[in-house]
Image (spheres, grey):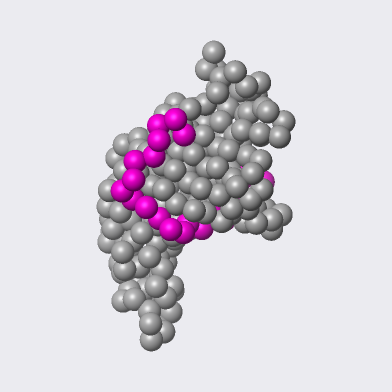
Amino acid sequence: MAAAAAFAQQAPLDLTAPAAAAQKEAKSSKGAAAPIPADEAVQRANAWLDAARVINADFVQIGPNGRRTEGQLNVARPGHMRFEYTDPPRFEIIADGRSVAIVDKKLNTQDEYFIGQTPLKFLLSDHIDLARDTHLLNVSQEGKTVTIELEDRAALGGTAHLSLVFDASTFALKQWTVIDAQGFQTVVTLFNVDLTTNPDPALFHIDENLPANQLGNHRR
């Protein structure tokens, strides 16, 4: 998960304004969903995210260098998340409710952060409200997807710019893009999403015995 590009000079999205801009951007193709007003899109995204107390999914990640990696995502809200990379099987990202650790299994080390420094922290909140928890920039619709763009000014290293892509019919989260303050972009796409199985709590355990770089985090 890359941190994100600085868009601090952009004005926040006015959800009370007419949705003409978002509708204009939607393609008028035969299979396209009907245009959805920006405020309704955010409300429906909030509803789907808030209802998703657990998420289990396969993912494909495209990193800043264009390299493709795959793995398994597990989320148990509030506060718990695990990315386990299986191809190649070198890294794990674990959130235990307080901290986030990026584990390098090859070097047997980890970098630790406060959970509040991660760009996706709002997805781990007990109750999710994108308009309250982030700085909304834009809502657009293209074909059968709706994209909500936002920024997080409290991410480690600077402001993070995120684009969340939802299914325009169900508002299931399909993909997100994170751009960090240096302009590096990471895209994560979800597949085979399971919203009912409770992940094993052991998946969210951070091994405090591993040598740790504590970047803004002081667990011990």
Q: Can you say whether 42 is above or below 133 in the image?
A: below
Q: Residue at x 59, y 34 (%)?
A: 102
What span is in magenta?
179-203
Q: Position of residue 98 (x, y in %)?
A: 44, 26
The residue lying toward the viewer, choosing from 179 and 66, is 66
Let me know if residue 41 appears in the view.
yes
- For the N terminus, the image quarter is top right
Q: Residue at x 35, y 38 (%)?
A: 77
Q: Position of residue 165 (x, y in %)?
A: 44, 60
Q: Residue at x 46, y 34 (%)?
A: 203
The residue lying toward the viewer, choosing from 140 and 170, is 170
Horizontal side of residue 114 vs 66, given as left or right: left
Decide whether residue 198 is among the magenta residues. yes
Horizontal side of residue 108 vs 33, given as left or right: right
Let me know if residue 17 appears in the view.
no
Decide whether residue 50 is among the magenta residues. no
Q: Quadrant of residue 218?
A: top right
- For the C terminus, the image quarter is top right
Q: How many marks?
A: 0
Q: Residue furthest bottom?
A: 30
Q: Quadrant of residue 188?
A: bottom right
Q: Quadrant of residue 54?
A: top left
Q: Position of residue 217 (x, y in %)?
A: 55, 22
